[in-house]
Amino acid sequence: MIATGARRILVVEDEAIVAEVVERYLRRDGHVVEIQHDGHAALAALAERPPDLVVLDVMLPGIDGLDLCQRIRAAGDTPVILLTARDGEVDRLTGLALGADDYVTKPFSPRELAARVQVVLRRVGGSTARVSELRFGSLIIDTGARTVTRDGAPVPTTAREFDLLVHFARHPGQVFTREQIVSAVWGDEFEGDDGTVTVHVRRVRAKIELDASKPMHLKTVWGVGYRFDA
């Protein structure tokens, strides 16, 4: 019997034993769990019925976990927890830049993973989608309507500027390099150099800040990249 309010978790893991252990611990917490073993099957499952959260292994046959994470994030706001190798620092950083909500390093404690799932679900309200409005004082970003307002007045943005702003706003306080920004916002479509990121950041800053020369939100971290302060 499924508990009222149970959350649907999609576990994408090609190692059957690992998937079985994860499933057992998540079911013990009252979740409804679906297992898929490769990226293509996971995409089909996501299209058929979006889950409340995805536990996603980085190393997958077909479509790897980072590519799948990027597709999930492009399609909506379903929370993602990555499972990465012990030495996969690049994968972890890339995954976070792509919008993953958390990561767990292999080999991992299934009890810890289950706890991380609970934390992420509480953080996003336990629903399939995150809250559509991101508020920072007088700056309001509506991810559902794809609109930005400041002091009640609309702030016009291009599609890319909006995606860039949302990426920053969803990770306040986190510093991103230009390479991470390109991966998260442009992905495979990117053609150009790091200067493209600089230009877009400058444009977004000019639109959302009261004084672009003294930004309150979108700040430069010299020698590293950029950070959004709430």
Image (cartoon, rainbow, N blue to C red):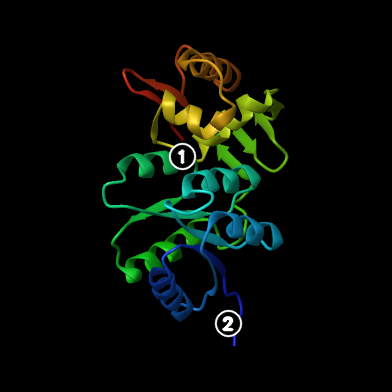
Residue at 60% in and 75% down: 5
Residue at 46% in and 39% down: 171
Residue at 38% in and 53% down: 103
| Residue nearest the viewer, comparing 40 with 197 | 40
Quarter of the picture containing the N terminus is bottom right
Q: For residue 26, what is the image quadrant?
A: bottom left
Q: Is residue 106 visible?
A: yes
Q: Amino acid at mark 1?
A: His
Which residue is tagged 1? 171
Side of 12 relative to 222 (left or right): right
Which residue is tagged 2? 3
| Residue nearest the viewer, comparing 173 with 64 | 64
Instruction: Say which element carries label 1.
Output: loop
Counting from the top left corner in percent of width and height, residue 131 is at 61, 50
Q: Is residue 211 visible?
A: no
Please say if 182 is above or below 14.
above
- Report the Cα–Cα distance between label 2 and label 1: 32 Å
Counting from the top left corner in percent of width and height, residue 125 is at 55, 60
Q: Amino acid at mark 2?
A: Ala
Counting from the top left corner in percent of width and height, residue 50 is at 65, 60
